[in-house]
Amino acid sequence: MNCSYEVKEGGIALATIDNPPMNALSSKTVADITLTIRAALEDPKVRVIVLTGKGKAFVAGADISEIKTLATKEDARALAQRGCEMTNTIERANKPVIAAINGFCLGGGLELAMSCHMRIASEKALLGLPEINLGIIPGFAGTQRLPRIVGKAKGLEMILSGAHYSAQDALAMGLVNKVVAPESVVDEAISLARTIAAKGRLAVIAAIDSASKGLGVSFDAGCEIESNNFAGVAISSDAKEGLDAFLSKRKPEFKDK
């Protein structure tokens, strides 16, 4: 497997991409990431997933040698669709997925990272979508997610220039949540994951659903989605426990029901 996970204390799944030397997204790696994320989502022990790359790269891009072998539009479309299946699996997950960007995060690597709900980057990370330099464009939903995250003008600048951006640049444009020392990136992501894992799972699911679905509809429609999700959790046992704990000045003990 080019990607696997281990469950750490607190219900944190650390999923690691391992396709040396640069974790290129070959078809096998794409399939293995998809299978690993699905397995972690179905694992009752897992509450939050941290995704990182082994070595000096998160993912340095797609497998160029594989792209060179594409002979028909159908072949190329199938490759792109498999990549989109991978990124959609992550973006639509009802468990939070945090990218720990430990190094090069380019092309398909950035597309993968953007599908995660949050992103922690090493201060030495380089990010970008350089596909235009090869005469192609992003194919794993990069042209769709990047403008939604950083805005249309900045997104097109990044896509059309094919330039690399520092972690600090990415932080300034809202592409990553936080920049930390290289040796701390996975620990920082796990720390955030543990904070989230301590919350009631019903509320976490409702929050992800509200924010994710709300971005694709009008503000008023988004408020309706939020209202329905709020109604569902407000009458839960976890809500009663959370409110009682607050009033009693104690730590809540959520049961996810």
Image: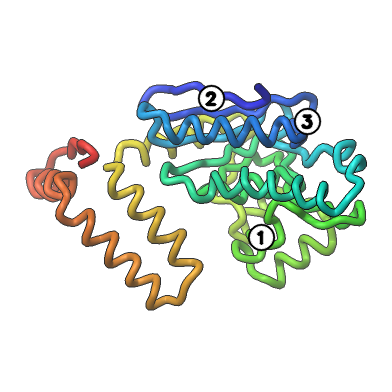
Question: Tag 1, which secondary structure?
Answer: helix
Q: Is residue 249 above or below residue 17?
A: below
Alpha carbon of mark 3 to alpha carbon of mark 2: how far? 19 Å
Tag in front: 1 or 2: 2
Task: Please tell me which residue is depicted at 18% across the width and 45% down the height of the picture.
Answer: 238
Indicate the position of residue 88 as horizontal and vertical percent values: 57, 49
Picture disc at residue 5: 2
Q: Is residue 103 above or below residue 8?
A: below
Q: Mark 1 Cα within 10 Å, few/some/many (few <14, many 20+)?
A: many
For disc 3, the marked residue is 22
Q: Nearer the viewer, residue 141 or 166?
A: 141
Alpha carbon of mark 1 to alpha carbon of mark 2: how far? 27 Å
Image quadrant in which the N terminus is located: top right
For disc 1, the marked residue is 146
Question: Tag 2, which secondary structure?
Answer: strand
Tag in front: 3 or 2: 2
Give the colour scheme shown.
rainbow
Quadrant of res 182: top right
Indicate the position of residue 161 as horizontal and vertical percent values: 84, 61
Quadrant of res 198: top left
Residue 48 placement, left or right of 200? right
Q: Nearer the viewer, residue 27 or 116?
A: 27
Q: Amino acid at mark 3?
A: Met
Task: Please tell me which residue is depicted at 51% across the width and 35% down the height of the picture.
Answer: 38
Alpha carbon of mark 3 to alpha carbon of mark 1: how far? 22 Å
